[in-house]
Amino acid sequence: MNNEYKIKRIIVGKLPYGEDLLRSMTEVCREKNVRIGTIQLIGAVKEAAVGFYDQQKKEYIPLNFYEPLEIVSSFGNVSIKDDDIFVHLHVTLSKGKGNAIGGHLLSPTKVFACEYSILELEGKELIRKYDETTGLYLWDI
């Protein structure tokens, strides 16, 4: 199942030093009223929290890293969950020796430097609904 969308606009910017990455990206989307879209970002963080989804237990296992990390890649989307704008990001981070870690972006992840681009889409809203099979809130398409 899928939907087709048109590009409405592209928003680029940078996040403030020391702010929480996920909360800040959510605030940007709320301020700009982005309800459907994709997000890309690069940069570095002072510390990070990522989640690994345990498919048997149907819950995220948080992993915390209290060290500087490079954002090698981060990609995600914007949709609607519980009648509110919901930002869903995954991130790949690199440690000082090049080892990679990654997962579902969680808070607190503190920004050192971060540049982002949001590709806002035009079309039918993507609404997240609880899926019994996976235990996740997935797009209702």
Image (spheres, helix red, strand yellow):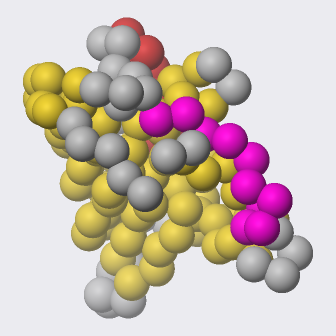
What is the x, y in percent for residue 23? 52, 31
Type of secondary structure dominating the magenta stretch: loop
**Along the viewing direction, whichever of 8 and 41 lies nearer the viewer:** 8
Q: Residue at x 35, y 76 (%)?
A: 94
Quarter of the figure with residue 56: bottom right
Name the residue at 26% across, 69% down.
72
Check the image and report above or below for 44 versus 96: above
Report the span colored magenta.
126-135
Residue at horizontal 38 percent and vertical 71 percent from the top: 93
Residue 131 colored in magenta in the image: yes
Residue at 32% x, 59% y: name it.
Answer: 74
Asked if one can make out residue 71 in the rendered structure from this viewpoint, the answer is: yes
Q: Position of residue 109 (x, y in %)?
A: 53, 49
Q: In the figure, is residue 117 to the left or right of 1? A: left
Tell which of 21 and 134 is nearer to you: 134
Residue 32: x and y, percent? 31, 12
For this orientation, the residue located farthest to the right is: 57
